[in-house]
Amino acid sequence: MAGSINKVILVGNLGADPTVSNTQSGSKIVSLRIATSDSWKDRASGERKEKTEWHRVVIFNPQLADTAERYLRKGSKVYLEGQLQTRSWKDNNGNDRYTTEVVLQNFSGVLVMLDSKGSSESSVSFDGNDVFSAPSSGGWDNSSATTPSADLDDDIPF
């Protein structure tokens, strides 16, 4: 394979307020816990089932870190683009430990707030270089968007 891609896209909700820390050089690092959920109709019982996955997200991009710290709170809905990164360390007992995180680096991360204070339909996007503002009133026109019905039949033949 000539090249490869390491890209993660998440749409989910914050499980807690962002955690802010600083490196020894003074750079801000923001950590998030994002919940994504999948729901389906159980074929045997007919009842709705749901599974939630938790994702660790670390923001190194200074503009995105500032935005996350200022505007994101527990329950905020976000769209994120980053890369998977695994780091290792030794615990207090000398055992090797590993953590895989979604990382938003200085030039390759995207954060879109899908809800904001006062309006659940506005959106603000920061990708490290550009700033896009939401409309001041009325939200986005999403009349052409289609969403799958929650009652879709899960009887797929394969």
Image (spheres, rainbow, N blue to C red):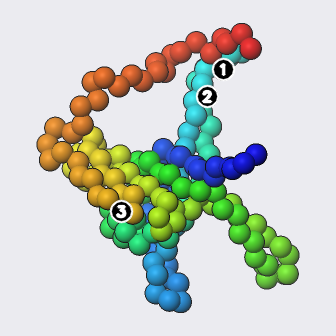
Residue at x 63% of width, y 60% of height:
101
Question: Disc 1 marks which residue?
Answer: 42
Numbered disc 3: secondary structure: loop
Residue 17 on image: x %, y %: 44, 63
Residue 24 on image: x %, y %: 53, 89
Name the residue type under label 1: Asp
Q: Is residue 152 above or below residue 128?
A: above
Q: Is residue 16 left or right of residue 121?
A: right
Q: Is residue 28 above or below residue 39?
A: below
Nearest to viewer (mark 3 / mark 2): 3
Residue 58 on image: x %, y %: 54, 65
Label 3 crowd bin: few (<14), some (14–19), many (20+), radius 10 Å: few
Residue at x 70% of width, y 64% of height:
86
Question: Disc 3 marks which residue?
Answer: 129
Where residue 49 is drawn, which disc sits there?
2
Label 2 crowd bin: few (<14), some (14–19), many (20+), radius 10 Å: few
| Quadrant in which residue 38 is drawn | top right
Name the residue type under label 3: Asn
Q: Is residue 29 above or below residue 121?
A: below
Numbered disc 2: secondary structure: strand
Numbered disc 1: secondary structure: loop
Residue 19 on image: x %, y %: 48, 70
Q: CA distance from mark 3 to mark 2?
A: 40 Å
**How many numbered marks does the figure carry?**
3
Q: Is residue 10 left or right of residue 147?
A: right
